[in-house]
């Protein structure tokens, strides 16, 4: 679709809450560093980086259940995060604008395109990723993981089992829609694996996206030298 222009050097980790995106992103950043001539950028659009008044207001518990407020808050966070990114450089996303699509996707498939177009107009600084790594995790498993977390989060009502099922259905619908219209590849990865196994599986995909030979090829080149 003409209004979607994927950024080829931007790879996003996506998945429902509790899938392990942030943990994996940090591990991949460390694993990628030896292979890249320039530092890789980490894009975190949902982290608390909105203007001060918005972040302070977000601490009010009653607003954390207001979908309109949360949508506006995340848009401002994403804008602030995007302004710090040079999209010409290799970028790994701990989420992307696809997160907001999946969490708020219309139930009718005929409305998906118009919904995405409107959201893209509101978030012009945030490009569509050139590749998506979908950390596929059953909602029940994600729910157990989230219950064991100790940190305080502002939107814990999004972590109920019902909300996680809704997110999962949203990602599935977005995945199906993206494939139907020929958007860039989605790679489905079983997120139940340990982090080190996920890094081993995903690292070659990232190196290809960032224009770097596979580690095995680099080893052969070093041996020949």
Image: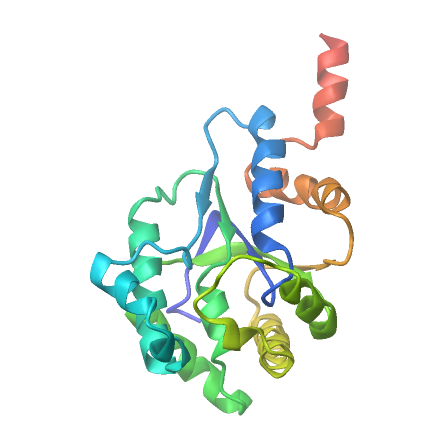
Residue at 61% across, 76% down: 164
> Horizontal and vertical percent for residue 28?
61, 40
Question: Which of the image's four quarters has the C terminus?
Answer: top right
Q: Is residue 58 visible?
A: yes
Q: Specify whether residue 125 is in view.
A: no
User: How many callouts does the rendering have?
Assistant: 0
Residue 39, relative to residue 52: is it above or below? above
* Vertical relation: 7 (above or below) 170: above
Q: In the image, is 182 to the left or to the right of 215?
A: left
93 and 148: which one is in front?
Answer: 148
Q: Residue 46's spot in the image, x, y percent? A: 42, 59
* Residue found farthest to the top: 225
**Is residue 115 or residue 43 the one in the foreground?**
43
Establish if 225 lies above or below 186. above
User: Observer-nearest residue: 27 or 96?
Assistant: 27
Residue placed at 58% from the left, 66% from the top? Answer: 17
On the image, which quarter does residue 20 sit in? bottom right
Q: Quadrant of the N terminus?
A: bottom left
Question: What is the image's colouring?
Answer: rainbow
Instruction: Relative to 149, say whether 68 is above or below.
Output: below
Q: Name the one closer to the observer, 5 or 77.
A: 77
Residue at image position (38%, 45%) is 87
- Where in the figure is residue 39, as x and y percent of width and height? 46, 30
Residue in view at x 39 percent, y 41 percent? 88
Q: Position of residue 125 (x, y in %)?
A: 31, 57
């Amino acid at each position: 679709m003409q209004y979607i222009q994927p950024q080829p050097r931007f790879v996003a980790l996506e998945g429902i809450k509790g899938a392990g995106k942030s943990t994996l992103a940090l591990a991949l950043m460390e694993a990628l560093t030896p292979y890249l001539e320039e530092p890789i950028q980490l894009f975190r659009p949902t982290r608390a980086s909105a203007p001060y008044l918005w972040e302070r207001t977000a601490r009010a518990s009653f607003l954390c259940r207001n979908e309109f407020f949360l949508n506006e808050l995340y848009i401002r966070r994403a804008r602030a995060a995007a302004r710090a990114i040079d999209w010409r450089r290799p970028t790994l996303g701990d989420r992307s604008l696809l997160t907001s699509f999946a969490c708020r996707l219309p139930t009718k498939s005929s409305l998906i395109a118009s919904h995405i177009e409107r959201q893209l107009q509101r978030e012009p600084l945030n490009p569509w990723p050139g590749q998506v790594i979908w950390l596929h995790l059953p909602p029940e498993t994600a729910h157990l993981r989230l219950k064991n977390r100790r940190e305080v989060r502002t939107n814990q009502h999004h972590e109920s089992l019902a909300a996680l099922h809704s997110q999962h259905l949203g990602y599935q619908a977005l995945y199906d829609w993206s494939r139907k219209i020929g958007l860039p590849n989605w790679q489905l990865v079983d997120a139940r694996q340990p982090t080190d196994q996920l890094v081993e599986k995903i690292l070659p995909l990232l190196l290809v996206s960032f224009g770097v030979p596979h580690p095995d090829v680099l080893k052969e080149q070093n041996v020949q030298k």
